[in-house]
Amino acid sequence: MPPFETSATLLIVWALVGYGLGSVSFGLILARLMNLGDLRAIGSGNTGATNVLRTGNKRAAALTLLLDGAKGAVAVLLARAFAGEDAAQLAGLAAFLGHCWPLWSGFRGGKGVATFLGLWLALAWPVGVACCVTWAASAALTRISSAGALGAAASSILWVVVMGQINTLVLAIVLAALVFWRHSANIARLRAGTEPRIGQRD
């Protein structure tokens, strides 16, 4: 963790800002705008890009991926610009939590992968790029979205160390643990060989 130099009050403010940004459910918004139905009644019921893709609309899925990533990046960049590195890390974590458990969507959100990648690209771009490459390679090789997510999350801890971003190590461990927790059902299906492929409707 970086030195805590920002006041506790401001840290709370930036945590709330990050949570607020993260909890904007772009998947739900785009699905409604494009008449794709209620995501919570489709596939896994999550609001992330993978479930949007199950509607068959690749454009909506791509937009969801980009916007979900952007909200994590924006949370980090705003907090860094107006407070400091400690606030940036906290805002990024809060954005991730907001995406996964959004207050105004009944705490039913996505699994946080796009937001995870976006916040890393803003927080430490070499780590973010490495995580994106790991995610893309793992997903391409397996044709399984969750495999890409788990690969990116697990490798993020390694990339943080290799690239000398030790002040983000605690955050990397916490985020990786949360990604794995959010994918617990996927992990069970991976072990059973029943995890759906990318683009497959279930």
Image (tube, helix red, strand yellow):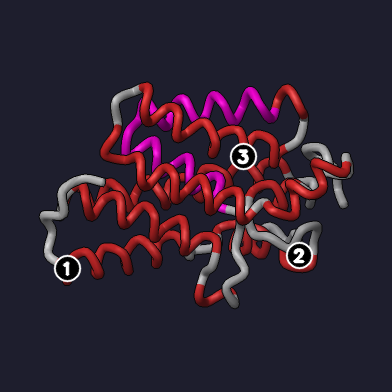
| Residue 11 coordinates in the image, percent (x, y) | 22, 64
Instruction: Compare marks 3 and 1 and give the one earlier in the sequence.
Output: 1
| Residue 8 coordinates in the image, percent (x, y) | 17, 68
Kind of residue indicated by mark 3: Ala
Which region shows up in magenta?
A: 112-139
**Of the two numbered discs 2 and 1 in the rendering, the one whose residue sits closer to the viewer:** 1
Question: Which quadrant of the figure has residue 152?
Answer: top right
Kind of residue indicated by mark 2: Gly
Question: Mark 3 sits on what residue?
Answer: 149
| Residue 23 coordinates in the image, percent (x, y) | 48, 65
Question: Mark 2 sits on what residue?
Answer: 37
* Residue closest to the eye, 113 or 174: 174
Tell me what residue is drawn at x 75 percent, y 35 percent: 144
The answer to whether residue 68 is magenta is no
The vertical placement of 118 against 137, above or below, is: below
| Residue 124 coordinates in the image, percent (x, y) | 32, 34
Tell me what residue is drawn at x 36 percent, y 52 percent: 92
Mark 1 packing: few (<14 Cα in 10 Å), some, or many (20+)?
Answer: few
Tell me what residue is drawn at x 73 percent, y 22 percent: 141
| SS under mark 1 | helix
- The answer to whether residue 127 is left or right of residue 3 is right
Question: Mark 1 sits on what residue?
Answer: 8
Name the chief secondary structure element in magenta.
Answer: helix
